[in-house]
Amino acid sequence: MKDVNLLISNGVNIQKSLELFGDMETYNDTLHDFLSEVEGKLAKIKSFKEQGDMANYAILVHSLKSDSKYFGFEKLAELAYNHEMESKANNMYYVTDHYDELMQEANRIVALVKQYMGITTTNVDASMVRPQVIKDQTILVVDDSNVVRNFVSKIFSNEYDVMIANDGKEALDIIRSNVDDKIVCMLLDLNMPNVDGFQVLDYFKQANLFARIPVAIITGEGTQNNITKAYQYPIVDMLQKPFNEVNVKNIVDKLIMVRNMNQNHQ
């Protein structure tokens, strides 16, 4: 039996998290997704720091910050936010001086979550990864956070197949192979490594895909310039992180309605 008091006594803001997840069952289920990727993410953060690659470092600590906010890991979220801002400013001195502090808190949270979940091994069991259900229509979710992708998958598990892409390159590969036209809409993050969201939007514009696959943007505390730039494309709407189940359902309903209207006018 999981004891939520263990989390609360260690500074986890459960009450704030339940505004997103709704109930502890969903919270606990999604914690599996956090564990399935967090150690790999921390390893990548270390690698980018050692390479001095502040652009990709900023993207990954942004993702860590977002996940931490979802689960109520407020101290880790604050530390990751500071690293995001300083790495965007290319402040290697700050990143180097405060890196151990970030990693210590991240490792504390990982150990705490494993203790709460009753996990004693260092590896996350493969059964934690939920299989995708194949449906007639597909929602494409493009985000470098496994938590976000699997949260959306859980919401629509009985209605749609949810296809996931870790970055813009994977998204474009999926779009180009969409020969059966199953993808009915896309939720797209802007801030991703390799190929970012704006490059995906550029491809959609060049290929005239917005009418066939309506797009909504997933964004965190994006700059006003990025928000303004995104609305220069014919996107349908913008979904602000952190979001809850109602937010996601409403925006997907809106995307499907736009797609149906576009098809009726063809």
Image: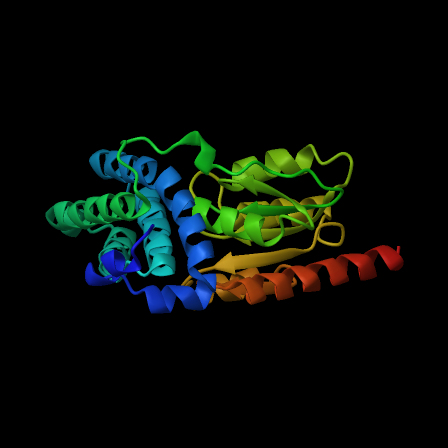
In the image, taking residue 155 as reference, residue 45 lies left or right, namely left
In-front residue for pair 135/96 = 135
In the image, taking residue 25 as reference, residue 161 lies left or right, namely right
So how many labels did they put on this image?
Answer: 0
- Which residue is pictured at 75% across the width and 62% down the height? 258
In the image, taking residue 31 as reference, residue 73 lies left or right, namely left
In-front residue for pair 132/187 = 132
- Which residue is pictured at 37% across the width and 53% down the height? 67
Query: For residue 265, what is the image quadrant?
Result: bottom right
Q: Position of residue 24 (x, y in %)?
A: 42, 59
Above or below — where is 46 with respect to 75?
A: above
Residue 223 is at least partly visible in this image: no
- Which residue is pictured at 56% across the width and 41% down the height? 164
Query: For residue 56, what is the image quadrant?
Result: top left
Q: How is the image coloured?
A: rainbow
Name of the residue lying farthest toward the left: 97
Query: For residue 133, what is the image quadrant?
Result: top right
Q: Position of residue 81 (x, y in %)?
A: 28, 58
Residue 10 is at least partly visible in this image: yes
In-front residue for pair 194/128 = 128
Q: Position of residue 139 (x, y in %)?
A: 65, 48
In-front residue for pair 198/159 = 159
Q: Quadrant of the C terminus?
A: bottom right
Q: Position of residue 229 (x, y in %)?
A: 53, 61
- Which residue is pictured at 36% across the width and 48% down the height? 59
